[in-house]
Amino acid sequence: MSERVAQPGNERLPELPALTGLRGFAALWVLLYHVWAMSGGPALRVPGIEFLRGSALLSTGWAGVDLFFCLSAFLLILPYAQWRYASAARPDTGRYLLRRVLRIYPAYLFQLAVLLLVAALFGYGRMLNAHELIAHVFLWFYTGWTWVAPLVGVWFTLPIEFTFYLLLPFLAPLIDRRRWPWLLLAAIAVSITYRILMHVAFADEPVSTQVIVVERLPGRIDQFVIGMLAGAAFVSAGLRGWRPQRPGLWFAAGVAGMIGVAASLIAVADRYWAGHPLLYVWHGLFSACLVPVLLASAWNATPARWLFANRAMRHLGDISFGVYLWHMPIVLVVLPLLPEAWSQAMRFWALLGAVLPASVLVAQVSHRLVERPFLRWKPAHRQ
């Protein structure tokens, strides 16, 4: 379903097609990263152009999750911004939460059931004991005294986003023009403080453990709030009839900023988890660069329209959640089938050639048979 913006007094929401395609790009970026990493992280280059390294883009593909988080916050705040700025009715919290549950749980539980069935019938994968099953049902990953690892690694981000869903109704009143600077400063302070404290507390643990504790919601609340404020700014500008004459320049500036911030991370990659300053601020910096990209895409700027509003990217955006959920299990099935003698680059291209179409196909099935029927049940927001 295409992204829509709430309008005062209007139940029907106009589409923002470039944002739908942008969500598809985020899923594709994460998929490309995992395919690249699982094939050995080959140094891909464009023939004859030594400085153009495809591996630089792929090695930062996990930033697609940052894009998911910011974009989600941008879209979810729109009806609340109409409430705060245009005297529209306050969105009903019960309806809002039901919509969020129906957006995530049917597709996720369907995948969980399929993976457990495959493990039971064919011995591929692993079964869950009662404690682990309860943790999976309630998305309690790496929580409490006994950590439960998710069956699929990418599920780790689901409780982060869902916890933000629960917080949003409480944060929404703070987007008033006199309060939002304090909201932003508070979010940045919480994020940096949490990341510093967790890194210090777990400094002697493996990097994999540090990732789990540092990357929880308190350490990423800044990028959710940044996305919220970008969405609020979009609504406010629309209500005042303001739109930049050249939104394409906003898009270009945002992309340039994203590249610069990503390049800075690549340059210090070997020191990042050792406590480099970027460990504490990188997600916020990247999200700040995403703001003009999100706004330009919402304004349907020409480059955003060309890149993301086309039919292929919009379809990928519609099924993006399924692509995100299913691509790693497919990677793990295909990877052992590739000859060990192949170079890393050959393994990358072969793995991509199998995983991308298979992920799209499975995501399409999930969207049509599971997600879309439940999405039709979602009650409309009352404006």
Image: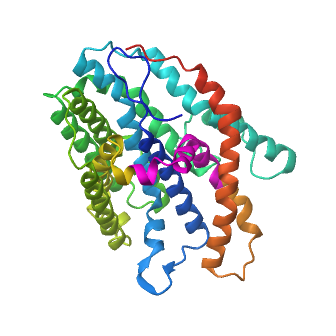
**Residue at x 52% of width, y 20% of height:** 98
- Residue 261: horizontal and vertical position, in percent? 30, 62
Instruction: Count numbered badges in the picture.
Output: 0
Q: Quadrant of the C terminus?
A: top left
Residue in view at x 30 percent, y 35 percent: 231
| Residue 149 visible in image | no
Residue 308 in the magenta stretch? The answer is yes
Q: Is residue 343 visible?
A: yes
Q: Is the residue 372 above or below the residue 148 in the image? A: above
Q: Is residue 208 magenta?
A: no
- Among the 4 quarters of the image, the one containing residue 89: top left
The segment highlighted magenta reads 305-328
Q: Residue furthest right?
A: 121
The dominant secondary structure in magenta is: helix
**Quadrant containing the N terminus in the rendered view:** top right
Residue 202, image x, y percentages: 39, 55
Q: Is residue 187 left or right of residue 44?
A: left
Q: Position of residue 63 (x, y in %)?
A: 42, 56
Taking depth in this image into account, of 277 and 210 the one nearest to the observer is: 277
Q: Residue at x 68, y 39 (%)?
A: 366
Quadrant in the picture for residue 73: top left
| Vertical order, 283 against 371 (above or below) | below
**Along the line of sight, the residue nearer the viewer: 185 or 194:** 185
Residue 238, above or below 209: above
> Where does the image place residue 300, in percent across and percent down from the top left?
35, 44
Q: Residue at x 51, y 78 (%)?
A: 44
